[in-house]
Image: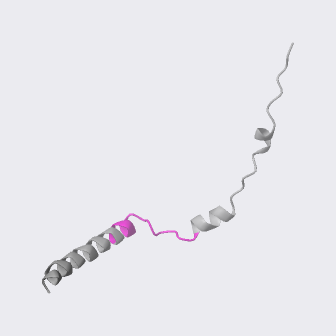
């Protein structure tokens, strides 16, 4: 029974800290665009640009 005197206030403090972290992240724009990053990964093009595919030819005399 004495453990409840410690655990109940501790759990209330943990809940308030979790709510504070959530609302701070929400205010800073953390959850604004949830779909965009996932779509950008699918549209990522890993092929090098044409000018970077071959090294430039050097002239030797």
Segment tinted magenta in the rendering: 23-35
Rendered view: 56 above or below 37: above
Depth order, front residue of 39/11: 11
Magenta stretch, main secondary structure class: loop
Q: Residue visible at 76% across and 50% down?
A: 47
Residue 45: percent from the left, percent from the top?
A: 72, 55
Quadrant containing the C terminus is top right
Which residue is at 27% across, 71% downward? 17
From the viewer's perspective, is residue 48 above or below residue 26? above
Q: Is residue 53 above or below residue 58?
A: below
1 or 43, which is in the foreground? 1
Q: Position of residue 43 (x, y in %)?
A: 69, 62
The answer to whether residue 28 is magenta is yes
Q: Which residue is located at x 75 percent, y 46 percent?
A: 48
From the viewer's perspective, tell me whether residue 47 is left or right of residue 9: right
What residue is drawn where x is 47% and y is 69%? 32
Labels in figure, total: 0
Image-quadrant location for residue 19: bottom left
Q: Percent x, y for residue 50?
A: 80, 43
Where does the N terminus fall, quadrant-wise?
A: bottom left
**Residue projecting furthest to the top:** 61
């Amino acid at each position: 029974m004495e453990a409840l005197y410690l655990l109940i206030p501790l759990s209330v403090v943990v809940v308030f800290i979790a709510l504070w972290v959530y609302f701070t992240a929400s205010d800073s724009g953390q959850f604004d665009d949830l779909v965009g990053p996932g779509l950008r990964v699918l549209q990522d093009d890993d092929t090098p640009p044409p000018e970077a595919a071959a090294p430039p030819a050097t002239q030797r005399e």
